[in-house]
Amino acid sequence: MQLLKTHALPLVQAALRSIGGDPSLVERVLQPAREADQGDLSLPCFPFAKSLGKSPVTIAEDLCSAMASHESIGEIHAVNGYLNIRVNPVWLAQRLLTQGIDNGCEKNARRVLIEHTSANPNGPFHVGRARNAILGDTLVRLQRLWGNDVTAEYYVDDMGKQVAVLAWALEALNRDEVEALLEDREVPNPMWASKPDHQRVRWYQAAQRLRKESDDAPEIERAIGELVHASENGDEGVLEQFEAAYQPVLDGMLATLGRLGIAYDRFTKESVFVTNGDVAALMEELGALEINGHAENGAQYLDLGQRGLKGKTEFFYRRGDGSSLYATRDIAYHRWKWTQCNELINVLGEDHKLQAQQVGLTLEELGARRPEVMFYSFIKLPEGKMSTRQGNVVFMDDLLEEAKAQAAAVVTERRPEYDMETVATIAEAVGTSAVRFNIVNVSPEKGFTFRWEDALSFEAGSAPFVMYSHTRACSIRAKVLQQLNGAKPPTSYEITESMPEGLVQLLRTLALHDDGLEKVIREHRPHLYAEYILHLSNAYNGFYRDCHVLGEDGVNAFYFAVSELARSTLKSGMEALGIQPLETM
RNA sequence: GGGCGUGUAGCACAGCUGGAUAAUGCACCGGCCUCCUAAGCCGGAGAUCGCGGGUUCGAAUCCUGCCGCGCCCGCCA
């Protein structure tokens, strides 16, 4: 609790000095108490025991009596060698209600570029890919809440083999041929019959099958190879053909992502850096580096072992035929990205760790900074790895439909008075929010197994739990405004000395918001913010239990002010997590 | 084989810049709707923090060895 620490720190330091201790340690050791009933700040006195020649228990007691009082401090206790400081709730309420929740630093807003998703546009978006998009978009939203100027960017892989396969198939095969080839495969969900990502992926899959099983495979491979080669050399006709092939697929994927509230400010095509000459210029520069090496056939690499890379140290950036590789283009892309921002964050799957190392080291070798990277581990199904080939895949479109249907069932049961349109609106918000929250709630580096029952849980610990607390606050606000009958809510009120437990807890939780968000931004860990918002919802529910805003003598203006502060904090927090803040549900 | 990550109650997961009784949700047991939305609230039970060593006043947290799981180790993307 930084708010309290600012005031308490000098007092603790002074107290320690007065009993002969070294106050320089206090800054680091004075920390938030782990248990709420211990207080808000806690100072373990063990580190001072040796130099003072006293037991920690005694030191804590001495400090306790040496501490000067301050309006911010409620109680101080010495317990088992800890000095526990509890905030004065009246002071805290005054502080929070006058200055509100401070979401960071408009003063030194930074230009942040976040690249995320960047999935190959060759088929519908499935939940295996979802972690990238959801984590990335949440990071974008959190950075914006913090006050930074953020660009969300999607890097479009518009060249190379995957797009070439799709483009080849669309030209070479007609619908009947495709369906004949995929006869033994699962029939696609008819609901998505007109969605181009679900459609065109059939062509891609048919081509993949032909490449493996057909007698003409070598010929097909040669045709695709030619396309790949042409695209890598910047052949405009081929690149146009590619774009015509993938753009509808990309649009379909974006429609799905849009339903989750995920949007991008800019799409940058990989081919741009080939056609504008950046990649060629880059390869020239790399060739002049001290750590450059040549293979027998003219291919070139950097020996990154000399820069500390372990394992395979040769990083190839140029093929024997002089063309570039994916990673080479990625480096050119990064150099361009650095011209657009002063902070660069990439969201990448753990399979890209080595490549990110190579790109990062190469950028440093070129005198540029390496980007910050948020890695995440893959989403699996209980049956194992997600694989389109084996039909072992959950499409996001299907998940969202199911989530909506389940949410609609819950709404209909609980609110029989709602009409169908209202139910549909609430169900859509609840379903998509629950899906997002389920994924953002766990730390990215942890393996994640997708389970329907978790994604569709609407109980405590889920997005709907948070949404529900927020609607309670909205409902109170609506009732208060109605009761005031057009008059303005009172701006002056008395902050009562005796506060119910739920109120104190809510105030303390609100006071933790800024510390929490700061850490989340610094460490790129959105799940901690999700946890905080759950905690805040829970605290609001406690306040709701203990404090009736609408009492027998009308509106309690103090309670209402606290409720409103919690409501707005919940709302902005939910938006930062991509949870839709409904007013009723 | 090498590199990176991960292992915490029946299940899922937080905590890991070392600090007091390891937090939370699901599932389980019990209680609360004449009172601002019960998608809620209150209480209970459930954990040798993968295993072994080490550092420390103090280790889930740091170091080390082993074991399990995941990912990577292409002149693919």
Image (cartoon, helix red, strand yellow):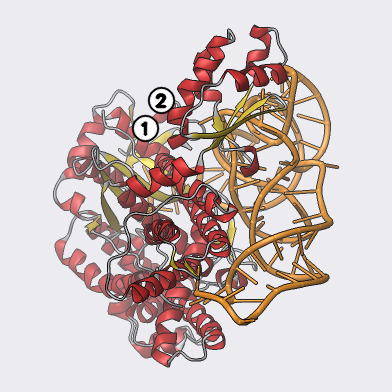
Residue type, mark 1 in image: Leu
Can you name the residue that lies furthest to the front here? A553
SS label for mark 2:
helix
Q: Chain of mark 2?
A: A
Residue type, mark 2 in image: Arg
Whether label 1 touches label 2, CB < 8 Å: yes
Rendered location of residue A437, percent (x, y) = 49, 63
Whether residue B9 is situated above or below residue B52 in the rendered picture: below
Q: Residue at x 70, y 18 (%)?
A: A56
Residue that badge 2 annotates: A307
Rendered location of residue A148, percent (x, y) = 27, 46
In this rendering, position of residue A270 left or right of residue A123: left
In this rendering, position of residue B58 left or right of residue A402: right
Residue that badge 1 annotates: A361
Q: Is residue A216 among the parts visible in the rendering? A: no
Q: Quadrant of residue A239?
A: bottom left
Q: CA distance from mark 1 to mark 2?
A: 7 Å
Q: Nearer the viewer, residue A3 or A210?
A: A3
Q: Chain of mark 1?
A: A
Q: Nearer the viewer, residue A101 or A370?
A: A101
Rendered location of residue A417, percent (x, y) = 48, 91
Mark 1: give few (<14), some (14-19) or many (20+) Cα within 10 Å.
some
Q: Quadrant of residue A94?
A: top left
Whether residue B25 is situated above or below residue A43 in the rendered picture: below
